[in-house]
Amino acid sequence: MKTDVMGINFKDGESPDVGSVRRTNYSGVNDYILKSEDLEILDKIDTAEGSTAFCTDTAELYILHMGEWVLIGE
């Protein structure tokens, strides 16, 4: 069972605090913005391969590749 919080789908029916995570693209591959302190929340999100996450406080960009969030730029 998936849980939806603020348009973000979480794995295993979890309903965690979303912190600063915000979904900005709602079509297939998703884009997120967040503060770096909330990076661990990304692992709980049920999202498509190729989704991206941008940390607004550090300018780090992550992409979901093979089930892992990988830092690709800053």
Image (spheres, rainbow, N blue to C red):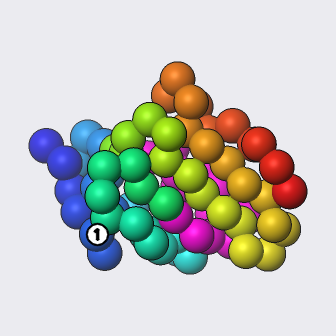
Q: Which residue is mark 1?
A: 7
Q: How many marks?
A: 1
Asked if residue 1 can be seen in this view, the reply is: yes
Please state which of residues 56 and 13 is positioned toward the viewer in this rendering. Answer: 56
Q: Quadrant of the C terminus?
A: bottom right
Q: Nearer the viewer, residue 34 or 40?
A: 34
Check if residue 35 falls in the magenta segment.
yes
Q: Which residues are magenta?
A: 32-45
The residue positioned farthest toward the front in the image shown? 27
Q: Where 43 sits versus 4, above or below?
A: above
Q: Residue 64 in the image: x percent, y percent?
A: 55, 38
Say left or right for 9 vs 33.
left
Residue drawn at point x = 52 percent, y = 64 percent:
32
Residue closest to the far left? 1
Give me the residue at 13% from left, 43% from top. 1
Residue furthest out toward the top: 66
In reply to whether residue 5 is colored magenta, the answer given is no
Depth order, front residue of 64/12: 64
Left or right of residue 60, residue 63 in this image: left
Which secondary structure type mostly characterizes the magenta part of the structure?
helix
**Residue 15 locus on image (x, y percent):** 30, 60
